[in-house]
Every structure is written in C-alpha cells, then in structure tokens.
Image (cartoon, rainbow, N blue to C red):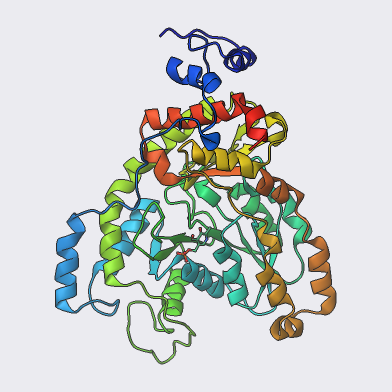
Amino acid sequence: MGKRNISRRQAISTASAGVAGALITWPLSAVQAGTFSQDKLAVTGGTKVHTGGWPTWPVWDQSAESRLTEMFRSGRWWLGRGEHVAEFEKQYAALMGAKRCLATASGTTALITAMGVLGVDAGDEVLVSPYTFIATYNAIFFHKALPVFVDTDPETFLIDPSKIEARITDRSVAILPVHIYGLPADMDGINAVAAKHGLKVVEDACQAWLAEYRGKKVGTLGDLGCFSFQNSKHLPAGEGGAILGNDDELVDHCHAAHNCGRPYGSMKQAPGYPSRGGNFRMQQSQAIILLSQMKRIGSDNDTRLSNALYLDSKLKGIPGIVPYKPAPGASRAVYHLYPFRYIKDQFNDVPKEKFIRALNAEGIPCSSGYGMQNRDGLIEEALTSKAYRRLFPESRLKQWREENILPGNDKLCGEAVTFSQSMLLGSRSDMDDIINAIAKLYTRRDELAKI
Ligand SMILES: Cc1ncc(COP(=O)(O)O)c(C=O)c1O
C-alpha cells in the first residue's frame, strides 16, 4: 500500500468520508482506515481495534532468586546485617550521577525524611505541585506543615515556576516540585526562585528514574531528590524508595533520620549525636530485587521514549488530541504514564469520560490522570484540626482557602488522558492500534456523542 503526503485536514475528511486506505496520515493501514468508516464503535457493539493483550508489569528477573534464597537462609534480612542495601545505594547513586544515596522503605518515607532533614517543621509552609499523587502533600502534612499549591502549566503538566513567587510567605521553607509521569520540571526556574528567597528544594522524582533536565538526572538538581520503587514503578521492588543528594552532611543526616537517629553506618545510638528519627529502613530483599531490576531500566526507558515520540508524532495530527509539551530544559522524559490532553470541542463536545470509556472498549486501556488534588477532602480535615488551628492564625488559613484557585491545574484535570508505562513497552503495531483507535473515535464522533 503506497502512502502519499496529504494535509491533515484532507486526511480527516477522507477518513470521515469513508474512503479506504490509500490516503492516510494518522490512520495506519488500509484495513483499519476502512474499518473506521464501516464498523461501529466497539462500545456500541463494533469490532475492537486492539484485540491482543498488553505487556504486563513488573517483569521478574530470575537472577535475583539465588541471592534472595541465600539471604533468606542466612537470616540476615534487615538493614543491620547484610550488604545488599548498601550495594544498591552505591549502584543507584552511580546510575543517577549523584554523590550519595539513602535507600528507604518507600517513596513516602523518602519525602518525609528529606523534608524533615531540610528543616520542614510544624507551622511551616511548602510550595508544591498540585498535579500529583496524594503521597506528595501527605508527606508535608506529616510534618504538620501547610502545602501551598502552585498552579500547573496545563501544556507541560508541571508546576509553573513563574507562579511560585506570588505564593511565598514568611512561613515558606521549601519548594517540592514533582516530575510527574517522569516529565522533567523546569528546575532552573524553580532553583532560581528558591535561591532568591532562601528556600530548600526537594524534588519529588518518585516517577522519574533516569529522566533528564539539561542532560542531568532529575532528583539530583535540588537539595535532595526522592524516588519510589513501588510495584508499578519503572524500578519496582513491591515497595521501596530512595533519597539522592550531593552534600555528605545532609545525606548522613538522612541516614540518621531514617534509622532511629543513629549516626550513618551504625546501628547504635551515639553520645554527642542528637538526632530524632523513625524507622524508615529498606529491607535486604527489596535491595536484591532492585539490583536485578536495574539491569533493564535503561533499555526499557529507551523503548518507552521511542514509542512515546512515535505516538506524539501521530496523535498531534488528530484534532483535539494534544501531546504533552516539554518544559524548558527538559532533555529526556521517561513516561511513567503517557499523557495527552483531550480537547472535547473538537470531538463534538463529547465529555472526556465517554471518550475514555469508548477507548477502553476499543482494547486501549486508558484513564483520566489526577483529579483536583488541591481540593482533596483530607486538606480541609487537616486545616480544621486542633493542631493546624494552633499552628496557623485563622487569617492565614482563610487566605490559603481564598488563594487555592488553580485554573491551569483545573483545566489539565479536565483534559488529561493517560496510558500506563507498560503499554509503551509494546510493539510498534500496538502503538498503531492506539493511534487508529483514537482516530476511529474522532472519525465516528457523532456516534460517540450518543453513547
Ligand atoms: C509523585 C509521587 N510521589 C510520591 C509517591 C510515594 O511513593 P510510595 O508509594 O513509594 O510511598 C508516589 C508513588 O506512587 C508518587 O507517584
């Protein structure tokens, strides 16, 4: 089948008019292009575009088995005995280009530890991205501090650095940007505001292993960077987390804070080393699994990136489908999810929920991204609690409520659609099915409006 270049508009009208195959840009094969016009949507009983499965996640690496068995038989299961956690810390720091690493029980405990060590305390404020997972702002609440949400740039899905300054108060101590979906945030912009106002920067890189900003790994660009190794993550261990840093004193303090306040490298309390701490330690079994999973993350990320760029190049040709735009300085995204925006005006005003339902029915699993987390009920519960009423004057909490208006973030929450990272490990023909299914929905948008 020969392809020839035609304009996007021509391609759309051609597909809409039901002319099969030869004239195509985003539709990928003659058979499928014909199907759009002749077949019904799968949600109304037509044939699915994608009938096969999708890669599953996580992928077990058998090389972990002998080390796990040996470790379990030895009884050396915890941090205090055994070498695997220390080995992982060394290898992860080297992989990420950081001086030091501390392995933790989870990404949440990494965030809690990093913020505590950088001085976030009761009554303080932390400027934070609202387009994120609940754990990001829960970690701020853990310290009885106030998360102050800074609006999102809906095009990049990331915190808009130009909006940070207006939300700084004399209680602000840190900025917590999130490299959501593995998309690098504009760290120069964020670090410049932090330096001007004497704020610390903790990067929430819990979804961004090996993502790069101006050629450097994210999570190494602020004061401390935090990662998650929960089961769905690109580097999975069931649960797990890490903090990266380049300042020995800070990272030593993180080690103490995650291990009952004991000095780095010791399992004993030391006189003259007064440090409060919890037990946020990683287990040896988590480290063994992570060491085995580290072998595949580089090539997996290459596959995800190549498929994501292919999707971008094709999907941007479909009216109403807008791939994410990299923030200034973002040099490599790692796509924990593949995100795009669905602009319903271009789809006869069909609500996003119907688009998602119909795309799922075509055999393309997708979901709607994060909700408006800045309106999460747990926030009001915290703000009205005894502790917050003691820690913050009523006038400050009133002002916080009045300023908690984030039009960019609201817009993004209304428009975002995502695919899971493991779908990006599929074949090129799987990607073609994604493109064709969306093109089918666009072509048959009149029918979509009626579902
Ligand atoms: C952006 C973000 N921050 C923090 C976390 C918390 O990590 P964990 O689940 O390992 O505690 C996650 C986990 O999904 C996350 O996606």
State the residue lying farthest toward the front.
45
Q: Quadrant of the N terminus?
A: top left
How far across and how far down the image is residue 169, in percent? 77, 67
Residue pictured at 19% horizontal, 55% vertical: 62
How far across and how far down the image is residue 264, in percent? 37, 77
Residue pictured at 61% horizontal, 71% vertical: 140
Say how many tags the image has.
0
Tell me if residue 26 can be seen.
no
Residue pictured at 65% horizontal, 48% vertical: 189
State the residue lying farthest toward the bottom.
271
Residue pictured at 37% horizontal, 41% vertical: 54
Residue 123 in the image: above or below residue 355: below
Tell me if residue 411 can be seen.
yes
Of the pair 65 and 82, the residue shown nearer to us: 65
Q: Quadrant of residue 355?
A: top right
Of the pair 111 and 431, the residue shown nearer to us: 431
How far across and how far down the image is residue 96, in percent? 39, 52
Residue 215 in the image: above or below residue 286: above
State the residue lying farthest toward the right.
395
Image-based side of 134 in relation to 193, left or right: left
Image-based side of 125 in relation to 330, left or right: right
Image-based side of 107 in relation to 429, left or right: right
Residue 368 in the image: above or below residue 99: above
Q: Quadrant of residue 405?
A: bottom right
Of the pair 265 and 158, the residue shown nearer to us: 158
Q: Quadrant of residue 126?
A: bottom right
How far across and how far down the image is residue 378, in percent? 66, 71
Q: Quadrant of the C terminus?
A: top right
